[in-house]
Image (spheres, helix red, strand yellow):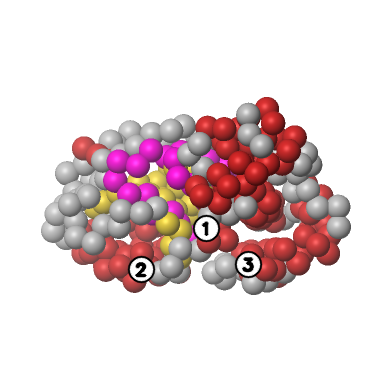
Amino acid sequence: MTTLDPDAAPRRALVLEERFAPGPGHWHRHRRAQLIHASEGVIHVHTPKGHWVVPPQRAVWVPPDTPHSVGSSWGYRLQTLYLDPRLPGVPRRAAVVPVPPLLAQLLGAAAAWGGDYAPRGPEARLVRVLLDQLPRELGRCELAALHLPEPADPRLRRITAAWHADPAESRDLAALAAPAGLSVRTATRGFLRETGLTPGDWRTQRRMLAAVELLTQGRPVTSVALDVGYADTSSFIAVFRRAFGETPARWAAAWRSGVSV
């Protein structure tokens, strides 16, 4: 486990690697911007504005000074690129970005020496190549299928907390809204205003993110469908295909083969 404080490192860019046990993670922030990439496992990243589920072919860009947490239901290994926020072109919005094979290899190589490298030499040159790859990846559109926007209203968060705790939660919106002091109409308007999604669409998106985590662990499609709240496997497959452009089985096979999904 690394003990280096990335915010105090002398280099303007560095990659640190660390293994983590299963768990929800803890909230923290860094002065530096981060590209958070799980070279092993599937992670979920939370910020006050959203939730992402990220397989190894993806990473989450976290802007400087953004509160966030990183966790997973299974063990995982992180390779995190930390960037000085004064570097030009540092985006100010969190997003999911692709990690093609070249970028993944560069992150792994730079993680071998972390923040302890000479300002001139082969290590510094490799880091510069790594930085050269970033603009084209950070410029890609965010993958909405892997993102779940969070409402700010604490009453709405009481509703989303139930869906976070159990994606298969079967109570209807009226049953969840009443304890939060909301009518169905007010809750629906709040979701649309704060997330751009209806409550039903938000719950469906939460189920899809849970399905991604389970599929990458090798779970059968039928089992995943039941675990995320679908009694009908064919309905689950249809919703998943609309979200990701592939059936769950094909998506999982592409993920296992290392193809970007």
Can see residue 206? no
What type is the residue that disc 2 sits on?
Answer: Gly
Can see residue 204? yes
Q: Which residue is mark 2?
A: 139
Q: Position of residue 160 (x, y in %)?
A: 61, 39
Query: Depth check: 7 or 63 in front?
Result: 63
Nearest to viewer (mark 1 / mark 3): 3
Query: Depth check: 50 or 183 in front?
Result: 183
What's the magenta region? 48-75
What type is the residue that disc 1 sits on?
Answer: Pro
Q: Earlier in the sequence, mark 1 or mark 3?
A: 1
Quarter of the figure with the C terminus: bottom right
Q: Which residue is mark 1?
A: 56
Rendered image: mark on residue 244 = 3
Q: Position of residue 7 (x, y in %)?
A: 24, 39
Q: Quadrant of residue 259?
A: bottom right
- Mark 2 and mark 3: Cα distance apart in space: 20 Å
Q: Residue at x 42, y 57 (%)?
A: 95
SS of the residue at dot 1?
A: loop
SS of the residue at dot 2?
A: loop
In-image side of 200 versus 17 (left or right): right
Rendered image: mark on residue 18 = none
Q: Residue at x 64, y 65 (%)?
A: 243
Bin the neighbour count of mark 2 within 10 Å (Cα to Cα): few under 14, some 14-19, many 20 and up.
few
Query: Depth check: 147 or 34 in front?
Result: 147
What type is the residue that disc 3 sits on?
Answer: Phe
